Amino acid sequence: MSLVITDLRKRYGDTPVFSHVSLTVAPGEFVAIVGESGVGKSTLLNCMAGLDSWNDGTVLLDGMDLGTLGDDQLARLRREKTGFVFQAFHVLPHLSVAQNVALPLMLLGQHDDDRVQAMLTEVGLGDLGQRLPQQLSGGQLQRVAIARALIHRPMLLLADEPTGNLDPRTALRVMDALVSQTRAHGAAMVLVTHSKAAAARADRVLLLSADGLSDHADPD
Ligand SMILES: Nc1ncnc2c1ncn2[C@@H]1O[C@H](COP(=O)(O)OP(=O)(O)O)[C@@H](O)[C@H]1O
Ligand SMILES: [Mg+2]
């Protein structure tokens, strides 16, 4: 089992964000999470990667209880097991496209230019590896972020509104890249999105509210 969250509760100071959040994501499964702005979707995604802490409950990633790990262990688990696609790209402006994509491999002490080139080709950026991020469009940058999140073949991809800033056509291409790449690598994906079209491609759609996650059968 790749990700098991049990009865998670989170508050900032005295302000509750969510409680009773339980979720099991099977290997290779694609789960979409929807919910109103401010309900804690980004916070929950960060908890899944051990990037944020919680007040009660457990997060098990590949059998490891994230709440019991120290910062170094968390950082290593994150590097090895997860990929994160942030809404705001977070590409490094002074590195080329290829160097940005290679970064997670470098952090693992691996170098594989062929794998980087193959991944760039797979997301439709095969000729753009030497460019700087400022020379790319928003949709191209988001595909750089996807390539970077998958280059080290993580078992879990976490994506926070990855099509939020994109026009519908570009959003479709970015979703195509996300779905085909996670499927090709057998990775599970948790996608936070406001897009009905994006959510419709998931195996399951869940609604986050203050009381936890519930089935969201109709994305309307
Ligand atoms: N670092 C923080 N300190 C205090 N409150 C925060 C912090 N980060 C987020 N919040 C609050 O927690 C709630 C959930 O935020 P967030 O996870 O970003 O929601 P969503 O992604 O669903 O829009 C919001 O009310 C937000 O203002
Ligand atoms: Mg958010």
Image (cartoon, rainbow, N blue to C red):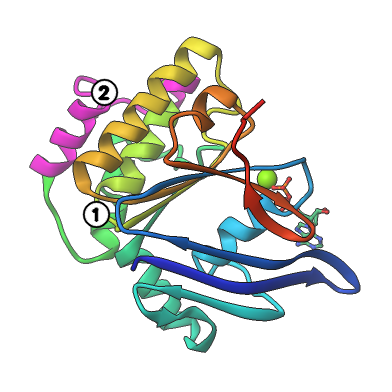
Q: What residue appears at the point 57 percent right and 56 percent down from the top-left corner?
A: 45
Please state, as top left, top right, bottom left or bottom right, where the C terminus lies in the image. top right
Neighbour tally class for label 1: few under 14, some 14-19, many 20 plus, Cα within 10 Å: many
Q: Position of residue 190 (x, y in %)?
A: 47, 49
Q: What residue appears at the point 16 percent right and 61 percent down from the top-left corner?
A: 110
Q: What residue appears at the point 58 percent right and 60 percent down from the top-left corner?
A: 46
Splitting the image into 4 quarters, where does residue 213 fall? bottom right
Alpha carbon of mark 2 to alpha carbon of mark 1: how far? 18 Å
Q: Which residues are magenta?
A: 114-139
Q: Amino acid at mark 1?
A: His
Residue 135 among magenta residues: yes
Pick whichever of labels 2 and 1 is earlier in the sequence: 2
Residue 121 among magenta residues: yes
Q: Position of residue 79 (x, y in %)?
A: 35, 65
Residue 152 numbered tag: 1
Using the image, determine if residue 135 lies above or below residue 169: below
60 left or right of 161?
A: left
